[in-house]
Amino acid sequence: MRAAETLVKAGLRPVVLDEGFKAGGQIYRQPPVPDGREPEDLYGSEAEKACALHETFERIRPNIDYRPRTLVWNVIGDSVDYYDESADVAGRLQASHLILATGATDRTLPLPGWTLPGVYSLGGAQISLKAHHSLIGQEVVFVGTGPLLYLVSLQYAKAGADVKAVVETASWSNQLRHASGLAHLPSAAVRGVGFMLSLRRMGVPIYRGAHAIRFEGESDCGLTAVSFESGGRSHRLSCIAAAMGFGVRSEWQLAELAGAQLSWSDIQQQWVPDLTDHVRASVDGLYLAGDGAGVCGADAAEVRGELAGFALLQDLGHSVDASRRQVLEKSLKKQWRARAALDRMYPVPMHLLDELADDTLVCRCEAIAAGEIRHVLVRPGAEDVNRAKAFSRAGMGRCQGRMCALNVQAIVERAKEQGPQAIGWQRTQPPIKPVPMAAMADAYVPDPEGTRE
Amino acid sequence: MPGRLHHLQNPLPGKTVEFLINGRKVAGREGDSLLTAILTNHKAVRQSEFGDGLRAGFCFMGACQDCWVELSDGSKVRACTTLLEEGTHVSLPELKL
């Protein structure tokens, strides 16, 4: 949205393809139909930013070609393949320059029972409330790590849900040890402390340093309880719903298809696209903004969007406001430093996979258990994550590895006693999300006889 | 049968949109995704093809692909990125919950 605004200001008319019903992405997602809630109800402390962004987008809308509900499923060279979900039509656009702002999805871990009905991703729980004004259940346990865990728990408690507990995997001492890094962005620290205090005031217990987490229930009924250990004691909380999220992971599939190089980030514990000048991918004419290019949060996403617009304009020979760019770069550096502190305070608890049982499902789509992945790794040639995928089908299902790829990688790393560099990432295959064959055929297969409807 | 999700009423109860689950008329709300509408009336959206039990969606943002549902005409849609429309007819696993 900020990138589009920057281009419009320079007199360009960009095409904006948005998978959402309405502009706003995930953080500033708008309900499909207004339901009488105020921005403060929807976005809390971020209401002002949300309104500013939505207003900006409404203002530039006459000057952009905006296409909501449009899924981009492939990029080859300068061709962008899309599927328009409202019209059920596929098509291809040619673009001399491409800005990708593909965002992020929840980082999940294969904990026992995580596929049970009633267990949702943390972001999903928030979307249910924010966009559709509904709770994932009346009694909810929140499991995971990081700021979003506290925010969504609090939003649920305020909306009237019985929040049984917040189950945090990071230890309190770890959080305190790295909290000084937030000095770069005191507002984040203040917000975070505010969430915790509000939860305490509302009587929601917070368990820290949690491990041995299980979602209990029957596969033909759904979740009935969450059990875990914390502070040397075992806990079991009855509930019909749970949300889990261990930070977020970059959605860079389109960037990879467009040719962007990826590198392993130790601090983010995931693969991220290589960037120069903050927003340039390793291919000419490709710019990456927002959490899809390494996770730095919503405020940074606005800055990165504007910087991506500037970089594109510069490549087109426009002059850009150098002092504005300096301000943006300075702000972004601060955001990255604060993000690094958060990543250290709330690391993805990959150690939980040390106790991953053979019968726990890792790939939701194909229902592949950890043992099946371990089993194929003894076969000759099964040295990397793509072979593990080919042999086991883990990551080959409808979600294309979004939910499991990093976890499959961790299993292979442990089995092979190798690091991420040697094991690699699951390569992206188009279409990155399911697209109806009929729409594809209409768009790409010639019909000279005119026999097709 | 009660659903899994819980619609909030304040400040507006929202306009009712009628649709069908296995031929039974049920009420959703204007602005619901098909997933929200189903799960406020029903406890799951599909059986896993691999025999590991029921699924009821997961990510709500079109990423995990767990919420594909069958419509009565045999076509399939991803429920979380589909807006509820009047008269939509979904075929869901019958539950003994």
Image: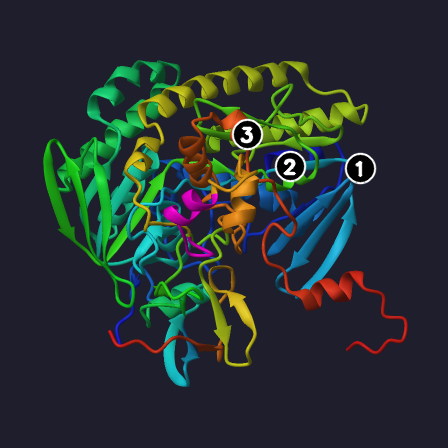
- Residue sitting at x 72%, y 51%: A81
Residue at the extreme bottom: B23
Q: Is residue A64 visible?
A: no
Identify whether B87 is placed above or below A204. below
Which stretch is magenta?
A364-376
Q: Position of residue A7 (x, y in %)?
A: 70, 34
Q: Amino acid at mark 2?
A: Glu
Q: Residues within 10 Å of mark 1 (few under 14, many from 20)?
A: few
Q: Amino acid at mark 1?
A: Ser
Q: Position of residue A337 (x, y in %)?
A: 44, 17
Count of numbered tags: 3
Q: Residues within 10 Å of mark 2 (few under 14, many from 20)?
A: some
**Residue that carries the numbered disc 2 in the rendered image:** A256
Q: Please say whether residue A369 is one of the residues in the magenta stretch.
A: yes
Residue A96 numbered mark, or none: 1
Q: Amino acid at mark 3?
A: Val
